[in-house]
Image (spheres, helix red, strand yellow):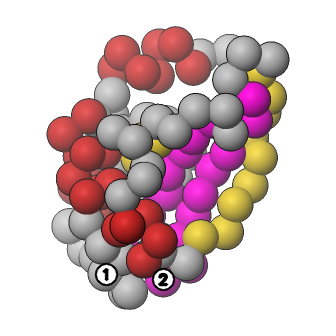
């Protein structure tokens, strides 16, 4: 899902660069100071996805929902369950 959605701007993100690829640019981790949700995207792409505390991609269904929702402005208990649903396909390609 692209990150042009306005819900992206409701979060208060701290941005950290994880690594760099010549094709896709910097891989950036976005951590919201208020709700604790983390997202990742490449600087040269508009695709974004949700990640867990260790930077692993979450399942597409969880990722799409998180991207569509506005910031809760506080920690959401249900997010811990969401973080158990990792995306197997995406994490395979990010293995180093
Ligand atoms: Zn947030």
Which mark, by number, is residue 34?
A: 2
Give the percent coordinates (x, y) of residue 52: 45, 48
The quadrant of the picture occupied by the N terminus is top left
Give the percent coordinates (x, y) of residue 55: 55, 42
Q: Residue at left 55%, top 78%?
A: 12
Q: Is residue 12 magenta?
A: no
Give the percent coordinates (x, y) of residue 20: 79, 28
Q: Is residue 30 above or below residue 46?
A: below
Disc 1 crowd, CA 10 A, few/some/many (<14, 14-19, 20+):
few
Label 1 within 8 A of ligand 1 by Cβ: yes
Residue 75 appears in which quarter of the rendering?
Answer: bottom left
Contact, mark 2 vs mark 1 (Cβ under 8 Å): yes
Label 2 within 8 A of ligand 1 by Cβ: yes
Disc 2 crowd, CA 10 A, few/some/many (<14, 14-19, 20+):
some
Residue 5 appears in which quarter of the rendering?
Answer: bottom left
Q: Can residue 92 be seen in this snapshot?
A: yes
Which residue is labeled 1 in the image? Answer: 72
What residue span does the magenta drawing correspond to? 25-42
Between marks 2 and 1, how big is the CA–CA gap? 8 Å
Q: Residue at left 25%, top 74%?
A: 77
Give the percent coordinates (x, y) of residue 58: 35, 39
């Amino acid at each position: 899902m692209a990150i042009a959605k306005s819900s992206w701007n409701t979060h208060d993100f701290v941005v950290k660069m994880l690594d760099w690829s010549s094709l896709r640019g910097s891989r950036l981790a976005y951590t919201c100071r208020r709700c604790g949700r983390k997202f990742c995207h490449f600087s040269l792409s508009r695709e974004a996805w949700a990640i867990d505390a260790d930077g692993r991609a979450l399942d597409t269904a969880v990722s799409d929902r998180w991207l569509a929702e506005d910031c809760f402005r506080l920690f959401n208990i249900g997010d811990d369950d969401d973080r158990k649903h990792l995306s197997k396909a995406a994490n395979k390609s990010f293995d180093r």
